[in-house]
Image (cartoon, grey):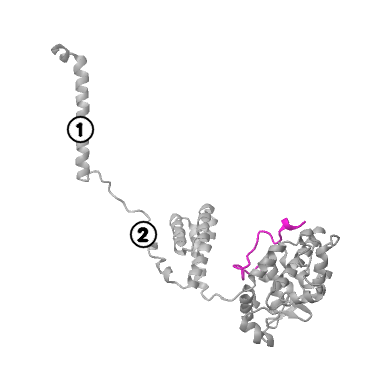
């Protein structure tokens, strides 16, 4: 047995194992001592951008107590800076724009932009554009709070917006059965109503302004959209005539069917109703779709020309002559001694952004799926 212990075949493996375990034990013991006495702690360092982080630490804290108008300005500032960033790093600009659109936290969006500014602090061109924005901001303290469309600054326009909001459900209903965009219907309504919302008119002073209601015509034109009787008759006729250039298809034929044996009385009655303006919007929507189809059949699309559609609504069927270069116009309307054409008013409203929360753009102004 002694001979075996003294042999090299035993000693070498044995002492190798002993030394390995001894080494492991020493390493573990040394590690424990090093950790216990914090000998392994790495020395911390201060980030090279620390002073920039410090400068933005409380930069926007006051934003939580700002007025609505000041918060709005912060959003404008954010968007301007995003647009500048887009010229240098579109990917980051897209991320921040997405946050700008979906977030109500203006402070965090501005901090996102500050994070970018720190990273681009050595980009001279970018820094110059951001500085230019700040200079312009300081110069534009006295910006106008009025609309660029002058006629939308009159008090009567504010009354109209309240009045038309009350009819949203009726306008949406007419739009649903005809496939015509609600905002396009309202563009026709605006031109007709704004000339009646005149502070010099006795009716406006007595009823329209105090009650915030739409004006219902009952003389030569009828209803809130000013449909003439002969136009109403033509709209009805074209709905049922498959040979008409304005024919929309069988699906629409019964939209304006009468419930009594006296069509003339019923027609005027439903157009001039003070309580329910649904038919005013329905006739207007059908007319728009009829002339749209007429022009389409002649090879001219006016789907994306609200100013032409509104003009045609105002001038009627006789003036609806499809052509490659139609003109915007119609009746001249005086608003505070300044002339506007019916078509221009409709165009300006449509693209103004006014009442957009109630009547936004649709993907299509006309629902093609409903046309037969």
Picture coordinates of residue 43, whole percent (x, y):
27, 48
Q: What's the residue at 22%, 36% (across, down)? A: 28
Identify the residue at the far left of this view: 2
Give the residue at mark 1.
Answer: 25
Assess whether residue 361 is covered by the magenta stretch.
Answer: yes
Give the residue at mark 2.
Answer: 51
Q: How far apart are labels 1 and 2 at the CA level?
A: 47 Å
**Span of residues in magenta:** 350-372
Query: Compared with residue 41, is residue 88 higher up or lower down, i.e. above or below?
Result: below
In the picture, measured across the screen, residue 150 lies left or right of residue 4, that is: right
Residue 208 figure quarter: bottom right
Picture coordinates of residue 236, whole percent (x, y):
80, 68
In the depicted view, which residue is nearer to us: 324 or 197? 197
Picture coordinates of residue 52, whole percent (x, y):
39, 59
In the depicted view, which residue is nearer to us: 100 or 34? 100
Q: Which mark is residue 272?
A: none
Q: What's the residue at 67%, 77% (across, down)? A: 275
Query: Compared with residue 223, is residue 320 higher up or lower down, i.e. above or below?
Result: above
């Amino acid at each position: 047995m002694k001979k075996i212990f003294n042999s090299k075949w035993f000693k070498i493996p044995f002492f190798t194992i002993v030394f390995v375990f001894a080494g492991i034990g020493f390493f573990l013991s040394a590690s424990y001592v090093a950790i216990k006495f914090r000998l392994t702690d790495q020395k911390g360092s201060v980030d090279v951008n620390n002073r920039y982080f410090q400068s933005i630490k409380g930069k926007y804290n006051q934003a939580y107590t700002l007025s609505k108008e000041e918060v709005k300005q912060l959003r404008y500032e954010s968007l301007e800076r995003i647009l500048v960033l887009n010229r240098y790093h579109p990917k980051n600009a897209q991320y921040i724009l997405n946050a700008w659109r979906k977030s109500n936290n203006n402070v965090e969006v501005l901090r996102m932009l500050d994070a970018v500014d720190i990273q681009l602090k050595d980009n001279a061109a970018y820094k110059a554009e951001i500085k230019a924005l700040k200079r312009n901001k300081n110069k534009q303290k006295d910006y106008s709070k009025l609309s660029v469309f002058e006629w939308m600054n009159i008090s009567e326009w504010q009354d109209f917006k309240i009045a038309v909001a009350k009819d949203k459900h009726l306008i949406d209903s007419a739009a649903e059965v005809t496939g015509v965009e609600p905002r396009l219907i309202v563009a026709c309504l605006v031109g007709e109503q704004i000339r009646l919302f005149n502070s010099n008119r006795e009716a406006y002073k007595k009823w329209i302004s105090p009650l915030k209601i739409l004006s219902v015509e009952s003389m030569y034109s009828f209803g809130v959209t000013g449909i003439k009787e002969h136009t109403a008759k033509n709209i009805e006729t074209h709905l049922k005539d498959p040979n008409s250039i304005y024919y929309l298809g069988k699906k629409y034929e019964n939209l304006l069917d009468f419930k009594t044996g006296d069509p003339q009385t019923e027609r005027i009655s439903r157009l001039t109703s003070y309580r329910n303006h649904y038919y005013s919007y329905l006739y207007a929507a059908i007319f728009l779709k009829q002339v749209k189809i007429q022009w389409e059949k002649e090879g001219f699309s006016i789907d994306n020309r609200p100013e032409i559609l509104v003009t045609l609504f105002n001038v009627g069927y006789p003036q609806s002559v499809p052509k490659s270069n139609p003109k915007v116009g119609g009746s001249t309307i005086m608003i505070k001694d300044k002339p506007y054409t019916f078509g221009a008013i409709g165009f300006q409203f449509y693209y103004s952004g006014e009442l957009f929360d109630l009547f936004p753009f649709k993907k299509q102004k006309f629902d093609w799926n409903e046309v037969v």
